[in-house]
Image (spheres, rainbow, N blue to C red):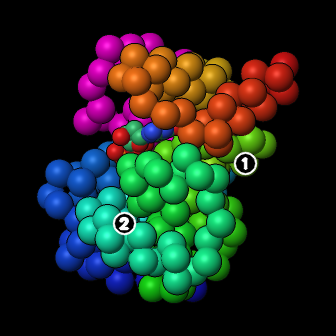
Amino acid sequence: MWDIDKIKAYLEENLTESRYIHTLGVIETAKALASINKIDLEKAEIAALAHDVAKNMNIETMRQIIEEHNIKLPYETLKTPELWHSIIAPIIGEEVFQIEDRDILNAMRWHTTGRENMTTLEKIIYMADMIEPKRSFQGVEELRKATFENLDKGFIMALNHTINYLLNKGFCIDVNTIEARNFIILNNK
Ligand code: DGI
Ligand code: FE
Ligand code: FE
């Protein structure tokens, strides 16, 4: 079982101050969304607290951890280091924080790209990461409003926003991001 003080101490040691402040914002938003969507508040808090645990980790260290754990990834994920902190997060979650809950570990794992057929907790962490109070980008207010009205509606808007952003920047779009959007637009009634 996790020890929240141990997680906080690890984060204070390993995250920059601005990243820690972002994390506190994600906790606040995740708990609010959890309450609306009838999800366990403590699970939302732990997933939010730990989601960016590897964000400030050295790229070479992350590459090594991925290799050592023999994690099979689509080749575009392997070529996109911005995504690696989400692959490392559940490993630290399990091995260092003793988090055993699969839903929490998966919410940490999929917080950056999303994936097909996400649980409510996974969507909550994805959305809280994007709309926490410190986030400011064009359209964020509309996204906040939609997400608090209906999680899936906000999630579709968020995926559209992310894909548009990546296209405009000329970046590669991860296959999981595409699969997340295909799944939710085809299965959301
Ligand atoms: O870690 P945070 O900054 O809080 O947020 P995040 O985990 O959503 O990471 C954001 C970064 O991930 C940002 O640089 C864009 C990138 N990203 C998200 N989805 C994709 C992606 N980058 C690529 N190339 N492809 C994606 O599908
Ligand atoms: Fe992240
Ligand atoms: Fe984050």
Q: Nearer the viewer, residue 19 or 42?
A: 19
Quadrant into which the C terminus falls:
top right
Q: Start and end of the magenta stretch?
A: 125-147
Which residue type carries mark 1?
Answer: Thr
Q: Which residue is mark 2?
A: 54
Quadrant into which the N terminus falls:
bottom right
The crowd level at tag 1 (other Cα within 10 Å; few <14, some 14-19, many 20+) is few
Residue visible at 24% across and 54% down in the picture: 19
Residue visible at 36% across and 23% down in the picture: 169
Magenta span includes 168: no
**Left or right position of 81 against 104:** left
Which residue type carries mark 2?
Answer: Ala
How far across and how far down the image is residue 141, in percent? 38, 17
1 vs 2, front mark = 2
How far across and how far down the image is residue 43, in percent? 58, 62
Q: Which tag, 1 or 2, sits closer to the chain's start?
A: 2
Q: Nearer the viewer, residue 142 or 89?
A: 89
Q: Is residue 32 above or below residue 54?
A: above
The dot on residue 119 is 1
The number of numbered discs placed on residues in the rendered structure image is: 2
